[in-house]
Image: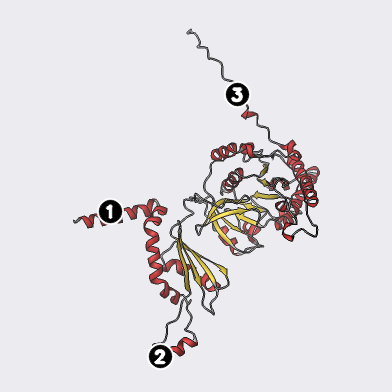
Amino acid sequence: MTGYTVALLVVVAAAVLLRWRRPAWYWMSFGVTLAALRVAVRYTSVMDACGLTVPPSRWRLMLARLANRPVPNSRAPRILRIRPTRTGLVLRLKLRPGQDAFDVAAATDRFRHSFAMYGVTSRELCSGVVELRMTGYDVLKRVQMPAKTDPAPMRIPVALREDGAVHYRDYRAVPHALTLGATESGKSVYQRNLVTGLAARDVALVGIDCKQGVELFPLARRFSALADNADTAADLLDALVAHMGDVYQLIRAHQRITADTPDAEIASDIWDLPEDLRPVPIVVLVDEVAELALFANKAEEKRRDQIITSLARLAQLGRAAGIYLEICGQRFGSELGKGITMLRAQLTGRTAHRVNDESSANMAFGDIAPDAVLAAVQIPTDAPGIAVTGDSSGGWARIRAPHTSLRQAVNICNRHADRAPDLPELAAFRPTLPHLATVPAPAAETVPSAA
């Protein structure tokens, strides 16, 4: 064999090996070029086969007759830009008059087959402009978050979407969220990614973990307040409601509503206050909401009503005061008692990991994105961490958080323990950590004498 043949065989073998073992490396080295060529060569014929072309306009037909030229061909949507990414290609299309973004979205599965891509999603950017995000491989099989993400203070990267984009938990846009998932579905790993992302930000973390604190207390050095039972949780939520009232009084005192104040500078929440006056935002994480809503006697029923009322008040009024809710559970339905559905209606963000039945998925998406219910039910048991996320806009996507062990989360929280603010209103609930006290050096061991 000649040297060129050997080199070609080596390149082909390397490409096959990379595609099998390291699909991300294969995509960046070989796949992106091949995919761009396929799109360029097949684009017009694929659009024609999918019914996404329009006949030539009347003035073009008239010019063709006057010039005695052939009839112009039908025209496909114009490609405004094609951009390679670390996971696929992004096409921005300008639709022709008479075309609709829904027709493009309905053809995404045919695009996936025709362009030999792993997945294709579509979204409308503005009137007449559609973006196609194509992924070259299964990005959720082995999640690798990009090195650089959005540094906004209350926008936390927690997972990767199936189209290769980063999924952010944006508290300014979506103040409160609900996370559902069965046992071993990856719900705890998602929560750890959220806590570790918040640990490096200037934010106070408040935790309620009624499983005797087994999930959140290992991360206690970064928390400003923690409760490990329902009685303590009731008192902690009451303290948060009182703190919320104090913050509103502060906002009213500095609203700056004089006639010479520009409209944009009038304060209506903590983010409109000067930085030296702005209270620290608080994120409240509830690990298992059902433990707060269940009761066995009259005394527990009274406590339960107190807890749900406090949570509903924080959900309705907490955004402007900088208090955000993250509520997790296996189920969140009306069987948990009065006030639960009212609380759920205030939780704009919804994330569902693998669930045990369709009714659990309906609790998350039935009122905002019915199409996401089927996607949540179809999550396989051998893929922990995969979830479906949506919000009140009706859009939804499949995501998967990178695996973060409890040890990794503990190390990150310990590293940023100095960022945990001391809130006087919550001082009684500050976690005590006697196991982190300095341990004296052990005395020298005495070697026992031989018998």
Q: What residue type is labelled 3?
A: Val
Q: Position of residue 409 (x, y in %)?
A: 56, 40
Q: In this view, does 268 lie above or below 404?
A: below
Closer to the camera in the image, 383 or 131:
131
The residue beneath circle 3 is: 439
Quadrant in which the N terminus appears: bottom left
Side (left or right) of 140 relative to 438: left
Secondary structure under tag 3 reads: loop
Give the number of callouts. 3
Q: Is residue 234 above or below residue 264?
A: above
The residue beneath circle 2 is: 67
Q: Which amino acid does label 1 sit on?
A: Val
Which one is earlier in the sequence, the residue at label 1 or at label 3?
1
Q: Is residue 448 above or below residue 268?
A: above
Q: Is residue 23 visible?
A: yes
Q: Which dot marks residue 10? A: 1
Q: In this view, does 247 lie above or below 114?
A: above
Callout 2–callout 3 Cβ contact below 8 Å: no
Instruction: Give the alpha-carbon distance from disc 2 to disc 1, as whole Å.
Output: 54 Å
Closer to the camera in the image, 298 or 370:
370
> Which class describes the residues within 10 Å of circle 1: few (<14), some (14-19), or many (20+)?
few
Of all residues shown, which one is farthest toward the front? 260
User: Of discs 2 and 1, which sits in the foreground?
Assistant: 2
Q: Residue at x 68, y 32 (%)?
A: 432
Task: Name the quadrant containing residue 224.
Answer: top right
Secondary structure under tag 2 reads: loop
Colour basis: secondary structure
Q: Where is residue 219 in the image (x, y as percent from the top left)?
A: 61, 38
